[in-house]
Image: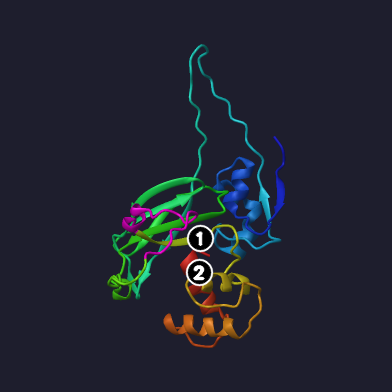
Amino acid sequence: MGTGSQHTAKQGDSIESIAYAAGHIWETVWDAPENAALRELRKTPHVLLPGDVVFVPPIEVRTESIATGQRHKLRRNSVPSKLTVRFLVDGEPRADAAYTFVCGGVERHGTTDGDGWLDESTHPLAAWAEVRFSIEAPDNPDLEPEPADDDAEPADEDPEAPEDDEDDEDAPLEQVYRFDLRKMDPSSELTGAQARLHLLGYGVNGIDGVLDGPTREALRAFQEDNELEVTGELDDATQAKLGEFTNG
């Protein structure tokens, strides 16, 4: 058995992805005594900052005695990664709403709970996930067909024009939310705060680590909406509140 190794985190790494690549469940890596300082610094295994050093314990060899001449199924223990997010509409929970969840080439269907929360398993190495809600088309009188002009000449048909697809008219409209699962720094970093503000719908001028005017305005709006002191700064209370929305 080896002595373990050290992994320097890159953009998009998490404890889950590092552990999965090494053949561990994430708790084995996160709870290793050698990572005590990292646990104190980051508080959560879900978010790392590039440059963080993670100790990866060695794989412990396990043997099993099984009968020959038979077929056996061996399963690897694992704890799935999770995407947990709450959906609101005009400040109210999007409760009991049917959705389609797509991640890592797998599509699943579910329903948000009574408080608008979604909780879905994701692959540790998945780069993105989508949540799709079907919505009803709004009534729009501007789209009503105009009355026919009896004196108008018929238009020439364009042979290259696509044929009308009658099914498209009946296809349900979708509201799609796409989540980047691998590119969010801790909320204590300005880049992490900008990413969370963007995810929550507050306008920022890029995720670049610059505390510019749009970022300050986004911070002020977030602070006001969450009953925090409105400073336009990434203070401790704002960091903590932003972290609540993304578990880190």
Q: Is residue 141 above or below residue 82?
A: below
Measuring 58% from the left and 73% from the top, which residue is drawn there?
194
User: The residue tagged with tag 2: helix, strand or loop?
Assistant: helix
Marker disc for residue 102: none
Left or right of residue 78: residue 15: right
Q: Check disc 2 and give the amino acid type.
A: Leu
Using the image as rendered, state which of residue 240 and residue 123 is in the foreground.
123
Q: Quadrant of the N terminus?
A: top right
Marker disc for residue 199: 2
| 201 magenta-colored | no
Using the image as rendered, state which of residue 110 and residue 163 is in the foreground.
163
Counting from the top left corner in percent of width and height, residue 98 is at 32, 56
Residues at marks 2 and 1, CA–CA distance in whole angstroms: 8 Å
Mark 2 packing: few (<14 Cα in 10 Å), some, or many (20+)? some
| Marked residue nearer the N-terminal end (2 or 1) | 1
Measuring 27% from the left and 72% from the top, which residue is drawn there?
147
Counting from the top left corner in percent of width and height, residue 126 is at 55, 50
| 168 magenta-colored | yes
Measuring 59% from the left and 44% from the top, which residue is drawn there?
20
Q: Are marks 2 and 1 in contact (CB under 8 Å)?
A: yes
User: The residue tagged with tag 1: helix, strand or loop?
Assistant: strand
Counting from the top left corner in percent of width and height, residue 40 is at 60, 63
Q: Which residues are magenta?
A: 154-172
Q: Check disc 1 and give the amino acid type.
A: Phe
Mark 1 — residue? 179
